[in-house]
Image (tube, rainbow, N blue to C red):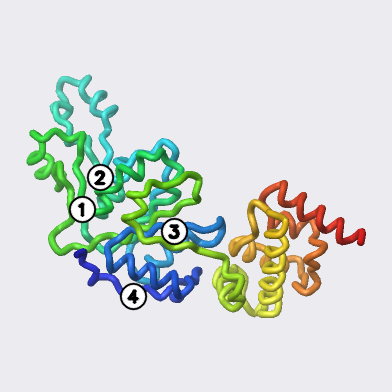
Amino acid sequence: MPDTAPYAEFTGTRAAHYVAAPHTATIVNLAIRLGRPLLVEGEAGCGKTRLASAIAEELGIGLTVMTVKSTSQAKDLLYRFDALRRLQDAQDPANTAARQVHPYIDLEPLGHAIREGQPRVVLIDEVDKADIDFPNDLLDVLDRFEFDIEDLPRAEDEACAAARGFGRHVKGPEGGARPIVLITSNREKQLPEPFLRRCLYVQLDFPADNPAMLADIVRRNLDARLEQIGDELITGAVERLCRIRERGRELGMQKLPATSELVDWVRVLHWQGRKAEAVSVDALDAVDQAVLFKVRQDIERYRARTDDEARR
């Protein structure tokens, strides 16, 4: 079993700019105790990426963020072999380092976290952007939290360990802590079942049934002093945004406004000196639409519904 002693309980309420639902905090703590990666999904703007920073902030540990690209390979998270620099150095007869591989091997963020064995949150962001081989190649690494540097010749194992502090096989120190690994997905493609089996899963939903939580999220993320904005504007904006989302769901909108749009909207209402109760869900103006909606077709659908309401 992994060593979970270094990690305190995550409550989801102590980070400066983030609030996690109680069931989300429970699943985070289970993932830590089981030593399992946590796969996080949910609609855009509901805090998938920021959950990792909230965990690191509340637990008082470091955070490493790795953003996955379409060209990413699993080994890119673990180590890097600078073959080009070795080739350039080999042009100089006096450079004897180029005769070996290990001077050109460096550990990447996940590799460092595994080797150090120190409490840390590791975020693998948007795993579904990469090819299907990417999550498949991470299976054993996330299962055992150790890996082999395939580009390092076995004959250089001891020399690399002496010079770099790690050999061909990399694992954490005895009794070290496993990193807390969060993996986000936007469901751009189906993840392989063997990968899913190794993860705990949490879905971050917009808390429409918890206006107090939404208001708390807004307060924590405002730049202006709260006394300047006031609870009346915040609670009014929360109520109207929930109604706008209901209408957007009826219209089949592609991107419903979420918490990030809500925070921006409260700022805009404050700057413009407007009261939330003066905003008509049936007649959003161009500014409100620009802040709340991100897809042209969504704006057109909502505007058409508004025009229909006005003609009745």
Bin the neighbour count of mark 1 within 10 Å (Cα to Cα): few under 14, some 14-19, many 20 and up.
Answer: many
The mark nearer the N terminus, 2 or 3, is: 3
The mark closer to the camera, 3 or 1, is 3
The mark closer to the camera, 4 or 3, is 3
Residue at 76% in and 57% down: 287
Bin the neighbour count of mark 2 within 10 Å (Cα to Cα): few under 14, some 14-19, many 20 and up.
Answer: many
Please name the residue that numbered disc 1 is placed on.
115
The mark nearer the N terminus, 3 or 1, is: 3
Please name the residue that numbered disc 2 is placed on.
107
Image mark for residue 175: none
Residue 291 quadrant: bottom right
Q: Calculate the distance from the C-alpha at mark 1 to the C-alpha at mark 2.
A: 9 Å
Image mark for residue 9: 4
Q: Position of residue 42 (x, y in %)?
A: 51, 58
The mark nearer the N terminus, 4 or 3, is: 4
Q: Position of residue 170 (x, y in %)?
A: 17, 48
Q: Is residue 143 above or below residue 68?
A: below
Residue type marked 3: Val
Q: Calculate the distance from the C-alpha at mark 2 to the C-alpha at mark 3.
A: 26 Å
Are the two marked residues, 4 and 1, in contact with CB atoms closer than 8 angstroms?
Answer: no
